[in-house]
Image: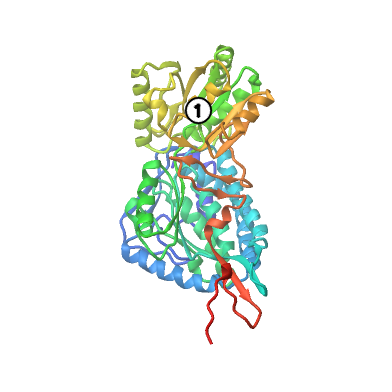
Amino acid sequence: MSKKVLDFGIDKALNILGILPENAGTSTGEEQFSNGSVIRSLSPVDGQLIAKVKTTTKADYDVVMETATSAFKIWRKIPAPQRGEIVRQFADKLREKKEALGKLVSYEMGKSYQEGLGEVQEMIDICDFAVGLSRQLHGLTMHSERPGHRMYEQYHPLGVVGIISAFNFPVAVWAWNTALAWVCGDVCVWKPSEKTPLCGIACHNIAAQVFAENNLPEGISCLINGDAKVGAFMTKDTRIPLISATGSTKMGKTVAQEVAARLGKSLLELGGNNAIIVTPDADVKMTVIGAVFGAVGTAGQRCTSTRRLIIHESVYDKIIAAVVEAYKQLRIGNPLDENNHVGPIIDTDAVKMYTKALKQVVKEGGHVLVEGGVISGEGFESACYVKPAIVAVEPHFKMVQQETFAPILYVMKYRGDVENALDIQNSVAQGLSSAIMTNNLREAERFLSVEGSDCGIANVNIGTSGAEIGGAFGGEKETGGGRESGSDAWKVYMRRQTNTINYTTELPLAQGIKFDID
């Protein structure tokens, strides 16, 4: 590693998180084992090798599943508030290791150190939410039509929950699922992205420590590593009733088909092509902050990143000038340097995708307002640094209709009233996050109405990214329809059961049916 990065304490962070340079990967607890091939975790910050991680073989996976299913038989019988206490202890461990884990997230994934810390804080927040939830896993009571009968609903844990997460949020999305699954009585098997395997190992080490300290089975939290072939072990496994998968729409369709083929349940969080509508009544300063952070935060690699800016023609020039001026102030560089706003994108394949998208949209007729390109030279030790770009487009362009996971912002005009802007926003296949910037109450309410945004998230006077854990997170259409995190998202991790109790000495039938026998 370069001296500049070492100054930020990466080696110390790895030590705190229990990361070993070799023989890490598959694990059911304190023990780490694998007979698989090796993944080399390379930092997009400087291109350096951080550690080697072994992938999971089918034999390894079967051991993991045996351990998980055995642990479930114990974990499900522990009262939910006591399970919540374990999650509370996990959150406290995260607080102790927040700086170290935040640095690893930044260094292995490439997002800014502040965003890395923010991601760990999301983990802590969802744990706190789950602790309270552990005393509120409530059902319903209903009145029976039969005298002397009582009806109610209750929820039971599902079993083993399979989690497949993406590189862009290498720890938070796992925690969204795991914290809720744990308090619901489920055990978890997690396959993190093969691009950020060390973040998975770090989280797993922290969880394993908590379970060991409480003399609980190691299989409550299990880890496997590898590519899509390893993920397929889970999607095809009838021992896993629920698969929660985060990633591209293409990946999600494959997962959905394989899980549906065995009548399992899927929770899918897939692509986003998120837009901000800017009306004539928008506050310019707020618009600029929301649009710029939404477009360049995490180097445009959030599922909620702002991809499209739909601006009314009467304020188009003013908004564009302000956004372009803000882009001139962006500092690109090592994300562990807190003076920088934008770090690298994940790898050279992502760089190729970014470059290809820019060329294609220009070929379609796009006009470049802020030039993109790959950055090299002193201070850019890897080939993963690119310039955030802005391109003026027409809404129907092919590249505008699809998601490019990179810092490219497409800007376009709308004319007339907000209905025309909504038509543009809703014209894409994805339906994750959306926003409107306006001080006009009628426009805001129209945006939130049944005829407004078709996305799972619809914001007024804030950007498309930066969701809080208290609300259910997810989207519609090709985003997959799943809901994670807050609200009543916990219900997906449990099975619902309707109960009827007859406390009389007779057996009347429902609907007044008569069936008399001696």
Instruction: Rate crowding at label 1 as few (under 14), some (14 to 19) or many (20 or more) other CA atoms within 10 Å.
Output: many
Identify residue type, mark 1: Gln
- The residue that label 1 is drawn on is 425
On screen, residue 208 versus residue 280, left or right, reads: left
Compared to 489, does 381 lie above or below?
above
**The N terminus, quarter of image:** top left
Q: Residue 430 location in percent, x, y?
A: 45, 36
Q: Secondary structure at mark 1?
A: helix
Is the residue 242 above or below the residue 456 in the image? below
* Residue under the image location 36 percent in, 60 percent down: 262
Q: Position of residue 471 (x, y in %)?
A: 62, 45
Please tell me whether residue 482 is drawn above or below residue 34 in the rendered image: above
Task: Residue 86: name its quadrant.
Answer: bottom right
> As rendered, which of 283 and 103 lies closer to the eye?
283
Instruction: Return the residue nearer the eye: 456 or 240.
Output: 456
* Image location of residue 36, percent across then percent down: 31, 59
Work out whether residue 376 can be spotted: no
Q: Is residue 398 above or below residue 139?
A: above
Most distant residue in the bottom direction: 518
Q: Who is closer to the viewer here, 22 or 515?
A: 515
Q: Position of residue 56 (x, y in %)?
A: 35, 59
